[in-house]
Amino acid sequence: MNIVVCVKYVPDATADRHFEDDNTVDRVGVDGLLSELDEYAVEQALQLKEKNEGTEVTVLTVGPEQAVDAIRKGLQMGADKGVHVVDDSIAGSDALATSLVLAEAIKKVDHDLVVCGMASTDGAMGVVPAMLAERLGLPQVTLGSVIEMQGKEVRIKRDGDTATEIIGGTAPLVLSVTDQSGEARYPSFKGIMAAKKKPVETWSLSDLGVDASQVGLSAAWSQVEDTAARPPRTQGEIVADEDGSGAKALAEFLASKKFI
Amino acid sequence: MTEILVLVDHVDGAVRKTTNELLTIARRLGEPSAVFIGSPSDDAVAALKGFGAEKVYVVDDAEVKGYLVAPKAEVLHQLVEKTSPGAVLISSNAEGKEIAGRLAVKTDSGLITDAVDVQEGPVTTQSVFAGSYTVQAKVTKGTPVITVKPNAATPEQAEGAGAVEQVAVTVSDAAKAAKIVASEPRKATGRPELTEAAIVVSGGRGTGGNFEPVEHFADALGAAVGASRAAVDSGWYPHSFQVGQTGKTVSPQLYVAAGISGAIQHRAGMQTSKTIVAINKDEEAPLFELVDFGVVGDLHAVLPAATEEVNKRKG
Ligand SMILES: Cc1cc2nc3c(=O)[nH]c(=O)nc-3n(C[C@H](O)[C@H](O)[C@H](O)COP(=O)(O)OP(=O)(O)OC[C@H]3O[C@@H](n4cnc5c(N)ncnc54)[C@H](O)[C@@H]3O)c2cc1C
Ligand SMILES: Nc1ncnc2c1ncn2[C@@H]1O[C@H](COP(=O)(O)O)[C@@H](O)[C@H]1O
C-alpha cells in the first residue's frame, strides 16, 4: 500500500505570528515547524504501515525552502520518503491554489490513501482535504478520531456536532484525522539518523505541469484587503475569594452587566 | 436584485439559528434564497420566510442523505449554475466548510471561511491567529462562497415571499462513495447549543473531574457548558463540548472559565467573547490577562456560592 501524507510547514503558534506588507502571512521571518495537527496524520499513516506489510509512506509538502524541515520531521518519525514542492510563484497562494498544486503532486505519486490533518494551525480553514477529494475525484472520509482499515475498506469514527458517526469508504480515498486520534510519536535517535539517508525529491511547478499564473498571490481567488492587530484586552478587576466574598463580588459584577 | 443562496442548516428538519443569521446577512447582499436539502415542514418554511427568504429551493433527494458532503456540493453547484447567485452563504461548521471547499473548486470560485461579519461587496471580516488579528477580505473570482460563524449577525425578522420550488438534481455515483455507516445521535442536554449560546460556562482541569459546579452555575445563567481539552482528554466531558483551536470557537456575550489556565489553543476558541470572567486558584494563570472580571479562589467553593447568589437575585 502507498500512503501520501500532506503536511504543512507553519509559523510557530507560540511565536509572534504576523502579516507582511502585502497582507500575506509571514512564513519566512518567524520560526516555523511541522503543523502539530499534521503530526497526527503522520502518526496514523505510520500505524497503518505497521499493520500492513509493504506499505510505503510519503510525506508531501507545498511550501518555501524551509518547509523541508516539516518533511524531515516526518521522515524522522518514520516515513519513507519526502516530496517538497517549492516554487517562488507559489507564495501567497490560497487554499484553492494550494489544493491544486497538492493534487497535481499527488497524481505523480502512487497513492491508495491520502492522509491530511484536520486543519492547518495557521490558516485553520480545514478545507484542503475536501478540495483534494474534489480535485482527485476520490471519496473523502474526514475528521476521524479512530481509524481502521481492512483490505481496501476504511472506517473512521467521527464525533460530529449532533451525532457520533461511523463513516466508511473504499481506497483510494482522502482521509483526515483529528487530534483525538492519538498522540504522535517523538522521533527516536535511530529515526533521526535514518532520516538523513531517506530520499527527498524537490519539484517545481513545471515538474507538475502547473502554470505559474494559476497560483500565488496575484492569481488568488480571494484577496485580503486589510489586516489589523486586535487591540489587546485590558485586564479588569481581579478579586481574591475570602470566606465567600468572591461569589458575592462575581454575582455583583454579572448583575451590573445585566447577565442576571 | 441578485439572488443570494443560503444553505439551510437544520437538524432533522429543525432550522438552526445560524440560518436566520445567514438570511439576515443575505439581505444586505441581495435577495435571499434558502436551499433546503431534505423535506421541510410547514414550520420550517414559515421560519425561513420569516427571516426574508424570497425563495425556498427544496431538494428532497433521499440519495443526498446518508452520503456526507459530496452530494450536497453537487446540489449547490447545480443551483449556482441555474441561478447565477451573487454569493453562496453556508454555516461555518465542519460540514459546511467541506461543502464550501468542494463548491469553490467546482465553480472555480473564491472561498472565504469563518467570517464573523459580512457586509456589502461582499466584504468579510475574519478573526485569525487565535483571535489576535482581524482580517478584511473579498472574493475576486467566480461566485463568492462564504462560510459564516454563528453569532455573526443578530437575526432580524423580515417577511419574504417564501416561494417553495422543488428542485430535481442528479447526484453522481462518485459522490456516494463515502457513506455514513452508523450514526448515534448525541443526547440532548437541554442547554443552549455551545456555539450559539449567549453565555458559556467552561470547566478545565481545575474541576478535578467534577463538572457539577460548572453545570449548576451554567443552568442558573441559562448558559451552555464548555470544556478545555485537558478536561476532554481526561474523559470528564465529551469532545463535542471542547472550546479551542481543535474544538469549537465561541464568541458569546459572556464567557466564564473555571479551572482553566488559558493556553493559546484554548484562547483561540474564546478570545473574541464580549465579556470574559475567570475563576482560578492561581493568580498567575495567563487567562487572567484577558478577563473583565476574575476571582482568585477555589472553583469548588466559588461556583456553588455564586450559583446560590445568582438564584437568589433572580428571585
Ligand atoms: C495541537 C493542539 C491543539 C489543542 N487544542 C486545544 C483546544 O481546542 N482547546 C483547549 O482547551 N486546549 C487545547 N490544547 C491544549 C492546551 O495547550 C492546554 O493544554 C489546555 O487548554 C489546558 O487545559 P486546562 O486549562 O483545563 O488545564 P491546565 O493548563 O492544567 O490548567 C488548569 C488550571 O486550573 C487551575 N485550578 C486547579 N484547581 C483549581 C481549583 N480547585 N479551583 C480553581 N482553579 C483551579 C490551575 O491553577 C490551572 O490554572 C491543544 C494543544 C495542542 C498541542
Ligand atoms: N501547503 C500544504 N502542504 C501540504 N499539505 C497541506 C498544505 N496546506 C494544507 N495541507 C493539508 O491540508 C490539511 C488542512 O489544511 P487547511 O485546509 O489549510 O486547514 C492540513 O492539515 C494538511 O494535511
Image (spheres, helix red, strand yellow):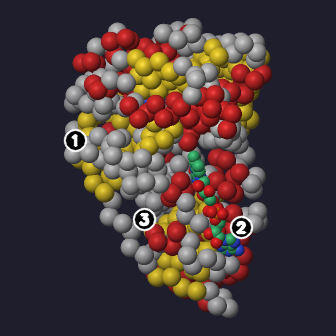
Compared with B254, B147 (above or below) is above
Question: In this rendering, would B57 be left or right of B119?
Answer: right
Q: Position of residue A7 (x, y in %)?
A: 51, 30
Q: Which residue is mark 1?
A: A22
Q: Nearer the viewer, residue A165 or B3?
A: A165
Respond yes or no on whether mark 2 lies under 8 Å from ligand 1: yes
Which quadrant of the figure contains the N terminus of chain B?
top left
Numbered tag placed on residue B274 in the rendering:
3
Q: CA distance from mark 3 to mark 1?
A: 30 Å
Q: Quadrant of residue A114?
A: top right
Q: Could you tell me the amino acid type at mark 3?
A: Lys
Q: Is residue B86 visible?
A: no
Residue type at mark 2 is Thr
Q: Position of residue A69 (x, y in %)?
A: 48, 35
In what element is the residue under mark 2? helix
Nearest to viewer (mark 1 / mark 2): 1
Secondary structure under badge 1? loop
The subunit letter for the residue under badge 2 reads B
Query: Is residue B44 left or right of B123 when viewed as pictured?
Result: right
Which numbered disc, 2 or 3, marks the residue closer to the eye? Answer: 2
Secondary element under disc 3, as helix, strand or loop, is loop
Name the residue: 42% across, 65% down: B274
Nearest-to-viewer mark from 3 and 1: 1
The three-letter code of the residue at mark 1 reads: Asp
Q: How far is the residue under mark 2 from the one under mark 3?
A: 24 Å
Q: Quadrant of residue B123?
A: top left
Residue drawn where x is 64% and y is 77% of the image: B281
